[in-house]
Image (spheres, rainbow, N blue to C red):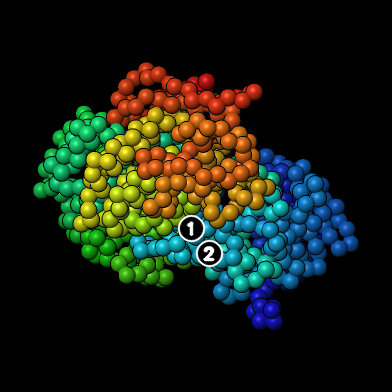
Amino acid sequence: MSYLYSQYHFIGNVIQHKQENSKIFLYCEKDHSVEIHFLLPGMFRVLVHRPDFAEPLLEYAIMEKEWAKVPLEVQEQEKYLVVSSPSLTLMIQKSPCRIKVIDKQGFVLQEDDPGMGMGWDAKEVRVWKSIAEDEKFFGLGEKTGNLNKRGKEWVLWNTDDPNHNNNSDPLYQSIPFFVGIRSGKAYGVYFNNSYRSKFNFGAGNIRYYSFSAVAGNLDYFFIQGPQVSKVVESYTELTGRTPMPPKWSLGYQQCRWSYFPDAKVLRIAQTFRERKIPADVIYLDIHYMDGYRVFTWDKERFSDPKGLLKKLQDMGFKTVVIIDPGVKVDSDYKVAKEGLEGNHFVRYPDGELYIGEVWPGRCYFPDFSQKSTREWWGKYFKDLMDVGINGFWNDMNEPAVWGREFPEEVIFHDEGKKSSQKKMHNLYGLLMAKACYEGVKELQPQKRPFVITRAGFSGEQRYTSVWTGDNQATAEQLAMGIRMLQGLGLSGIPFIGTDVGGFGGTPTHELFARWMAASVFVPFFRTHTHYGSSDQEPWSFGENIEEISRSFIEMRYRVIPYLYSLFWESHQTGYPIIRPMFWYHQEDRMVYNHEHQEQFYVGSHILLAPVVQMSQDYKRVYLPEGKWLDYNTHKVYEGGQTIFVDAPLHTFPMFLKEGAILPFGETMQYVGEKQNTRLQLEIFPSSRSEYRFYEDDGESFEYEKGVYSIT
């Protein structure tokens, strides 16, 4: 500890304070000050001001809005300043400055470590909090390992790691938000800092947890529950919520690196229709481009893109293309020339252009932190949309360059702030997705864009869906992916999925079937595989697996009305589509058991328990409190127990909670194939059952004007 105290500048004693409406300013020794701003009765911001440091606050993740005034009562005592909102009380110790957060029942939700609290040195800014014996931590977006992140230190630094495993960290996404649960009560923390960050949840100690960054502001938000759902709702009020997706994007999607030439693409589409396997989307990976030049077509492989896409459209298919940020250095290439003319590329401080190597070879990289660059990038989607492209897949946007990252010396415009690579790296994927979404929406204002991204940051849910990147065809990664999706959902990102079957390697027949089963209710349902790997279409594993896959995909289309209604709920509240069991059962110790962490809710009344162990035709399932109906056998179970259920390869364990009302649609080959379809209600009745079914036109923004129906 002596080393820490000799190196760190800690917030010292509170000398005086001032209140300005919903803000409290604590003036401390050495001209340090702490600003506490209540945005909601149960959410406040803590911002440290230092006389030797002045950097503009990070704004990209937070919604621009006027927050209503929160009434505060301030009482000064000898040793404490007591600040009370309608929901919380802050006991602020004066000597030294330490903050304790207490709810109205007197329960301590969070408290600064008594010896450290908040501080900084030349290498980092950091906050230390006391850790309770039973405290658990969840979230941080896309993280490997267990759902509960306690006992490890996690790094946030967007990283392209195609060979990651269950112990790998960091990965493609950086979401500096977590949910803590202490004695059954939930709270959240959003750390508003985009620099390389660490979240130490009691790794190597039982005294404290901490969060830190290598630079930037010491700026965080505390969010009260006590329910996990309330924490996520408030967090997404702060960082934004997902727009309604185009309904077709909930259909099955087929991808590989790569489908080419055009005849191959057409043959894949025709085979889906001939074999009566429903599908909505086919992807074109990097080989559709001319020498990997973004926004171009390879004229030999795709001689008539418009004609091809018209044929796909006539069969009910949408087409999504990959978009990489690297712009080939080529004096005859329009995008490169216009990018240079408009000063749209990342540069060194002396003005020299940064050049890195990726698929096209030597490349420039757009500076998406500049509004004019985002608008410039957005206009290039027009040509692709004009020939019939329906969606855009943002890849390599950590950003990834061969063998390294951008050098630390490069400078980003950052709307005139001239910020470093250290600050902007984690924001690159978010800002590229923003450029894509806003550009497509500007070009086609009556249709909802479909955007998917590999890299991102808090707030990306306003623009894009997310998949978990390059996984492997192993049972371990099937299980890991389910946990990662739950973490992303808790972090405010509902439209999520994995590469079904695994991107790297070849799945066994059994693994492919189990992965398909586990993905029936996952919002983003896409199969993808590596260049040169074995075929991974649903018919590629023999007749038995084809029939099993067909039945799972058909079920997916039947449950789209249910999923679509959940997206409306997410748009309104920020709730995820797939939810960990503790979402509804925070005080049940069994839901935190490692054995059951691949079980998850879909909405409030469906509990799934995918089989993730191979050579196993049964599943050990924990049923929380209540009554549960086994969807496959119609047997009713009392909750609060662990059961064994049969799980042959052609099915998966699915349970309906008492009171469930589920709208199931008709089987169809693609979304919209049949009009005015009938709904079938699957009901597990209780004395009182209630459900809200949402409908709109599935493609426009008219829902924002109230043009929708709720039954």
Callout 2, which amino acid? Trp
* The quarter of the displayed image where residue 676 is located: top left
Left or right for 651, reference 603: left
Residue drawn at (56%, 60%) of the image: 149
Query: Image height check: is 67 above or below 350?
Result: above
Left or right for 512, reference 199: left
The one of 470 and 649 positioned closer to us in this rendering: 649
Q: Determine whether the residue tagged by mark 1 lies in a helix, strand or loop.
A: loop
> Residue 445: x percent and y percent?
37, 32
Left or right for 600, reference 265: right
The one of 455 and 55 positioned closer to us in this rendering: 455
Q: Determine whether the residue tagged by mark 2 lies in a helix, strand or loop.
A: strand
Query: Image height check: is 403 above or below 102?
Result: below
Within 10 Å of disc 2 (Cα), the crowding (few <14, some 14-19, many 20+) is many
> Residue 594: x percent and y percent?
55, 56
Residue drawn at (41%, 35%) of the image: 245
Q: Name the residue under label 1.
A: 143
Residue 334, can we see it?
A: no
User: Disc 2 vs disc 1: Cβ atoms closer than 8 Å?
Assistant: yes
Residue drawn at (22%, 49%) of the image: 535
Query: Image height check: is 659 above or below 8?
Result: above
Callout 1, which amino acid? Lys
Residue drawn at (49%, 50%) of the image: 598
Left or right for 605, reference 186: left
Q: How far apart are marks 2 and 1 (CA)?
A: 8 Å
Q: Mark 2 points at which residue?
A: 154
Q: Quadrant of the N terminus?
A: bottom right
> Residue 543: x percent and y percent?
24, 40
Looking at marks 2 and 1 on the same chain, the residue that comes earlier in the sequence is marked by 1
Which residue is situated farthest in the right direction here? Answer: 78
